[in-house]
Amino acid sequence: MDWKVLIADDDRNFRYAMCEAIPWKEHGFEVAAEAVHGRQALEILRDKEIHIVLTDMEMPVMNGVELTEAVKKQYPEIIVVALSAYDDFEFVKESMRLGAEDYILKQEFDGEKIIQMLEHLCAQNLEKRRKDFNQGRENEAFLAYLQGKLDVPAQGSPYYKLLDKDHMTLCLAQSASAFEMHVRNDGNLLFFGKAKEHVWLFIYQMPQTRSKSQWMQEQLCMAGDVQSGFSGNVRIALCDESGGFFKLPGMYAKAETALQYAVYFPKERMLHYLDISRYEKTRKRDYVYDLPEHRLSVQQETGERILMEMGERLKENMPEEEFVNGSFVNFYKEFLAGSTAKVDDMEVIKYYEGLKQWISVEDKMDYTSACMEKWRRQMLAAYNGKHKSIRKAIEYVYKHYAEDVSLQDIAVYVGLSDNYLSNLFKKEMNENLVSFINKVRIQKAKKLLENQNLKVNEIAEAVGFHNATYLSTMFKKVTGMSISEYKSQSAGLSRFS
């Protein structure tokens, strides 16, 4: 069997070099696909069998860090190797933290060493698969059955014994952080194990009762037992029925649905499907908050107000948590875009990783507000560290970018000569003033391009370029993409990618 390789890199020359300079076939490998960004790579993974992903770190649409995280969540058995330049090694470290097995420095390209690395990783991968099959497949198969992905565990599985059980029920327990668990087993606990990150599954044998009220009382006692078994805060999600083995997937779905509402009922320590089922018909599962058109400037107080409004809309519509998180990420990216000419991808990644640790909308709002304040302080410190005249020049650019801004205009505003301002700006900002103005204009143009009703010449006029040709030229120079490429790639993104 050849190991099938996917190369994800927006540099066509490097992809060509990878394909041609390495004798893949001689060593049992095959370059089965190529992608120019992470989103395209994920689309290929859905359609093709791929064993190894070699991914560049800096790509449009979806970068290598985001691709690594997505691959390891959706296809954990795939080997991921980061392709790195010296100046993006921080991205490599983040990818390794998210599960990438190794990295390749582009500047030290050596086909023989790359093959040796991949052969070693493939051998490790095979050994891990064997161990997983022998030690953990039964548990995975049982969870897959409960989640409706598998008909029934194989005969001989440790869970096959549950087939003759009746009057079973289950619950899910979610913790906000990892902690040690001590569960007391009084003989009625048939199974407990990790269902997913921070979520544990418990299956209990329920006694036969004559009334629904008695049954619910027994269920609450069971939930209390689970709750007391944790050494920290825990939230319990309960279904509304009991039964035999073939009813367990339905119970699991109800408990999982109840658990989703922890986002909206943060004070409830027990969430029962009976209580929350009335919201199921009216909730908008894929709702994403629409941000207002204007920027959430780092100097403005509107950010906090819009954050509060977004929280209220999310609680009204009750989307699933991935869409809740998507709304918050959209908001934070917009906030960052209002404070700098270029959004820091690593800052967004750090924010998202922290956001996932919080359960309720209120907690996510508090976390976001704290991140905004921290970013404001960092920006203010950096801003105050600049020469007073440079701070005034930056303020002028952000206020007048849509006008015919010139070096002479800004020099008059700050009270310096043209040459002195130009040299001082280059020294303080590590780029010339004209380049900075163009970056600000392009950042504003990218936001306007999201509006499909605006024409390119209208956008050019709105951001100070005044004609579509000049905007197109500068857009390509600043972003490395044409406007049509940017619009095409943006259209393929989910609303919160």
Image: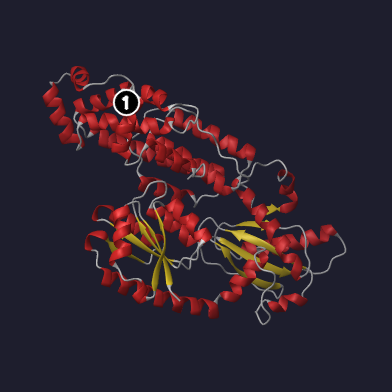
The image position of residue 157, as x and y in percent, is 65, 79
Name the side, left or right, on which 134 lies relative to 375.
right
Look at the picture and state if 266 lies above or below 417.
below
The image position of residue 100, as x and y in percent, is 39, 63
Q: Nearer the viewer, residue 496 or 33?
A: 33
Residue at 67% across / 82% down in the picture? Answer: 156
Q: Which amino acid does label 1 sit on?
A: Tyr
Residue at 77% across / 74% down in the picture? Answer: 165
Q: Quadrant of the N terminus?
A: bottom left
Name the side, left or right, on which 313 lies relative to 294.
right
The image position of residue 55, as x and y in percent, is 37, 58
**Label 1: few (<14), some (14–19) or many (≥20) C-alpha neighbours in 10 Å:** some
Q: Can residue 369 be seen in this view?
A: no
Q: Mark 1 points at which residue?
A: 398
Q: In which quarter of the image is residue 245?
A: bottom right
Look at the picture and state if 29 lies above or below 286.
below
Q: Which of 399 and 470 is in front in this view?
A: 470
Look at the picture and state if 208 lies above or below 442.
below
Give SS at disc 1.
helix
The image position of residue 143, as x and y in percent, is 63, 68
